[in-house]
Image (tube, grey):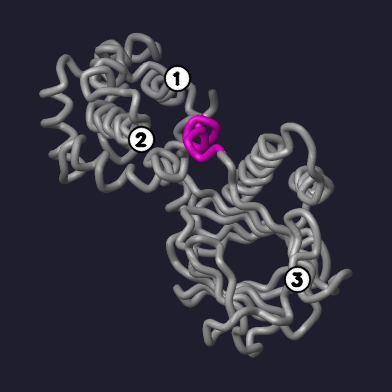
């Protein structure tokens, strides 16, 4: 598995919120759902996205915007259009004053808006679940990461457009997977166009020595890796390997191995069927006590507290 696939695996959609909006100007939507990541595809017309972080981006037909949560944002036909729709964490929509919306209505399956045709048509997919591992990718994005229309992304967005308003057996799962395709395509395109924002390990994966070592760590975190064994598996001397790894990754092999194991452990805690003891074995710790000690030092709380505070929203969403 390549680096990007490995990191994004935890962001697979599960019952993601998907909506097609048909809009005639003037319109302005204020989104305060605090979702980890939202994918916005502009199918027709134009729009502007304004993040509370201060970033403003213009969108044209075929563009994709990746909106990194939990920051709220506004999407409108024009930056000066007053907000008239508020959308909260439960995807409830109301007028700014809290009254029912009179000019926005349901127009079909997963479709709403203020027009039956829409000068502007956009698709929105909101990921309900978060992943500690995938945050290492998402946190490298700007608050509004825009990918312009291209041969790379258009086939995926077209498929999503064709299927979002359809309804049939397995439709929800199909839409989840199509949303994943759009996200992965957009993320890898954005990093290719913004190499200075790419995490160190994306470049390091291209290195024949360190890339091989990273694959070993990512795919087999439970193995008792040492600097010597990683160097041997990668065809390098121990000293040369350690220098090369640190130069590319910004920390040594043991430090990175520890960070990766504890990141995976954080994600595994979202599965209520997994005990701390079983997770310890899966990420290379000899006992639940050893994992708890390392996890608490790294994350600032025990696995039990982490599961109660950080994973509770994920478990609720899955249920």
Q: Position of residue 109 (x, y in %)?
A: 77, 54
Seen from this angle, which residue lies furthest front? Answer: 100
**Magenta residue span:** 3-12
- Residue shown at 27%/39% (left/top)? 307
Answer with left or right where residue 270 lies relative to residue 47.
left
Does label 1 or label 3 sit earlier along the sequence?
3
Q: Is residue 311 visible?
A: yes
Q: Position of residue 291 (x, y in %)?
A: 17, 26
Secondary structure that dominates the magenta span: helix
Is residue 6 inside the magenta stretch? yes
* Secondary structure of the residue carrying numbered label 2: loop
Please tell me which residue lies in front, 103 or 81: 103
Residue where numbered disc 2 is placed? 270
Residue where numbered disc 1 is placed? 212
Q: Up-down: is 298 above or below 32? A: above
Residue where numbered disc 3 is placed? 113
Q: Position of residue 302 (x, y in %)?
A: 16, 38
- Residue shown at 84%/47% (left/top)? 162
Does label 2 or label 1 sit earlier along the sequence?
1
Answer with left or right where residue 119 lies relative to residue 241.
right
């Amino acid at each position: 598995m390549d680096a990007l696939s490995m990191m994004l695996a935890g962001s697979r959609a599960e019952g993601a919120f998907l909506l097609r909006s048909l809009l005639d100007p003037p319109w302005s939507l204020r989104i305060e759902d605090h979702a980890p990541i939202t994918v916005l595809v502009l199918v027709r017309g134009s729009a502007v996205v304004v993040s509370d972080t201060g970033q403003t981006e213009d969108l044209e037909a075929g563009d994709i915007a990746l909106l990194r949560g939990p920051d709220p944002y506004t999407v409108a036909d024009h930056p000066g259009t007053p907000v008239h729709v508020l959308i909260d964490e439960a995807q409830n929509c109301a007028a700014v004053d809290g009254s029912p919306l009179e000019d926005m209505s349901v127009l079909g399956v997963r479709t709403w808006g203020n027009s039956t045709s829409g000068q502007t048509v956009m698709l929105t997919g909101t990921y309900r679940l978060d992943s500690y591992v995938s945050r290492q990718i998402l946190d490298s994005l700007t608050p509004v990461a825009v990918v312009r229309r291209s041969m790379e992304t258009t086939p995926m967005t077209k498929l999503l457009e064709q299927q979002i308003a359809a309804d049939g057996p397995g439709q929800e799962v199909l839409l989840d997977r199509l949303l994943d395709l759009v996200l992965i395509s957009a993320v890898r395109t954005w990093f290719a166009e913004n190499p200075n924002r790419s995490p160190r390990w994306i470049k390091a994966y291209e290195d024949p020595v360190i890339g091989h070592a990273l694959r070993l760590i990512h795919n087999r975190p439970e193995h008792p890796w040492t600097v010597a064994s990683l160097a041997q598996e990668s065809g390098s001397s121990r000293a040369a390997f350690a220098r090369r790894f640190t130069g590319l990754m910004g920390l040594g092999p043991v430090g990175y191995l520890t960070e990766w194991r504890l990141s995976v452990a954080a994600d595994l805690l979202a599965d209520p069927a997994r005990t701390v003891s079983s997770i310890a074995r899966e990420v290379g710790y000899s006992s639940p006590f050893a994992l708890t000690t390392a996890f608490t030092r790294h994350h600032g709380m025990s696995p039990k507290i982490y599961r109660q505070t950080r994973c509770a929203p994920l478990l609720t969403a899955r249920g």
